Amino acid sequence: MSQGKTMSLCFNPACRHENPKDIVSCERCGQSLKLGDRYRGLREIGSGGFGRTYLGIDESETNHPPCAIKQFFTLLTNDAKVSSRLFRREAQSLQVLNHPQIPKFLAYFSIDEQQYIIQEFIPGETLEQELAERGVFGESKIRDILNQILPILQYLHARNLIHRDVKPANIIRRQSDKLLFLVDFGASKLHTGTNLAKTGTSIGTAEFVAPEQLRGKAVFASDLYSLGVTCIYLLTNTSPFNLVDGDNHWVWRDWLGENAVSSQLAEVLDGLISPGLSNRYTSASAALKDLNQPRKAKNVYSRYLWFGSAIAASIALFSVLKTTQQSSKIEPTTSRNEPIIRPSNLEAIQSLSTYINLQNEAYLDTGKFIDQLSQLIAIPSHYFEVQVINNHGVQIAAIPRQSDSYGYVAVLWGGKISDADNQRQQNWQPKDPTDLGTFSLPSFRKTPSDYITRVNYCESIQTTTEPPLLSTVGESLPLSTDELPCPQGYAFSLGIIDAIAKLSATSYPTNVQ
């Protein structure tokens, strides 16, 4: 296709002519260029034994959102009947799924012996592509994969669905927020009690398929096996067939080279890839629990958490006292806007607190925030998005993986206090008793810093799985939540402060200098 030109591809496999973008029928063969009078193909983005995948647009929507169009043609397959059934099964499976990390099903068409599935388009790379471009994955990336994909498998298995083709090529990392998506449900199968012992068709990619699945007896743990093999493949960049010895025992550790992993992660991987079902994890939740058990060597993490807890608790107390002292000068409002206080997810806020303090320490050392942090272990309930705002701020968002949870955000400002800022700070008064102002994050270090950091804690007003919009950060020292606002859909949260205070009661400083 010509670079910079938008074309309209003909879906006829015998034609595939590139047409001008706005016409309705193919110039060469006359076939309609739109499926269901709305979906138009722009360019091919993948191909395989079943047919092709196109990047398309939905012209029935005003902004023409992108979509993925999967096309299956009977004539290209060796077993047309089986392949056609698998394609229809994928459409049926997708219709009943509603998970933020599974592409949304949009439509299914069968036209002139050609079948089409229309799905949400996920811009990004597969883990297979990522491995080829960037080399082997380290422990932190493998932990992130497990913490993101295991909850998806848990969701599928709770609905009696087995994916049966978990592999690097079927996991896409979305470019915008690094969220992982599980794709290609053509091999998925409904698991019922009656078919558990029956032998069926062996489907999947041989290198990643569990032994029982090769015999046509896939179970939920078969998906866990494939995910574990995916991980050791990404750790070694070596075919799984080479990671077993002559006695069919896994020897993947011998292929790690200098890419060492912790004993905890190794044990979890061994529990996922055990050939025998009796020694393998039987549920995704059990693997997640073992993966995220606290590890003994966490001195730095505990120190940062205690710093964050002590600082936030003391500042909260100072702010309340300051508000109380000045409240006599202020007439209470008749309709107060109470801060959002909800039951807090302590694990998510614990990780958020650590992110905040790592950013604070980095800013006090260098005068700038960092846009990537790999020091934290991902957690099952939330994933994290770190975005630098201009030159003065950073937004750290804990985004729920499930649609019944709330999101948490910390908006940080960093800079030097000017004389004008000093004067504004001395003259600042809260607008009403609920205005606590922004929190300052000092550093208890021997080496003083020229910089300071301010933070505003936010919580989503409604349950969500969507990443928040970017907030705004000004150049001057923010003194109130109006000057360091929460992103749209979020509000100031005393619940986070309360959660950090609870965490401070169970943490203590180690090795503080």
Image (cartoon, rainbow, N blue to C red):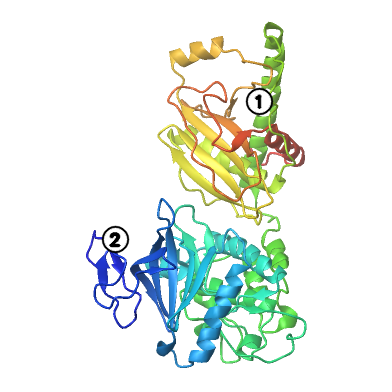
Q: Determine if residue 206 is in view.
A: no
> How far is mark 1 from mark 2, CA to CA?
60 Å
Q: Position of residue 486 (x, y in %)?
A: 56, 33
Q: Which residue is mark 1?
A: 315
Is disc 2 surrounded by few (<14), some (14 to 19) or many (20+) residues within 10 Å? Answer: few
At 68% across and 21% down in the image, what residue appears?
434
Residue 328 falls left or right of residue 133: right
Q: Is 2 drawn above or below residue 279 in the view shown?
A: above
In terms of sequence position, does the residue under pointer 1 or pointer 2 come before the other?
A: 2
Q: Which residue is mark 2?
A: 22
In the image, residue 477 sits, relative to residue 359, either above or below, namely: above
Is residue 174 visible from the viewing direction of this image? Answer: yes
Residue shown at the point (45%, 23%) measured from the top left: 416
Question: What residue is drawn where x is 46% and y is 61%?
Answer: 122
Residue 289 percent location from the top left of the image: 72, 62
Q: Amino acid at mark 1?
A: Ile
Image quadrant in which you'd find residue 503: top right
User: At which x and y percent is residue 297?
Assistant: 65, 54
Q: Secondary structure at mark 1?
A: helix
Could you say where residue 164 lies in the image, as x and y percent from the top left? 60, 79
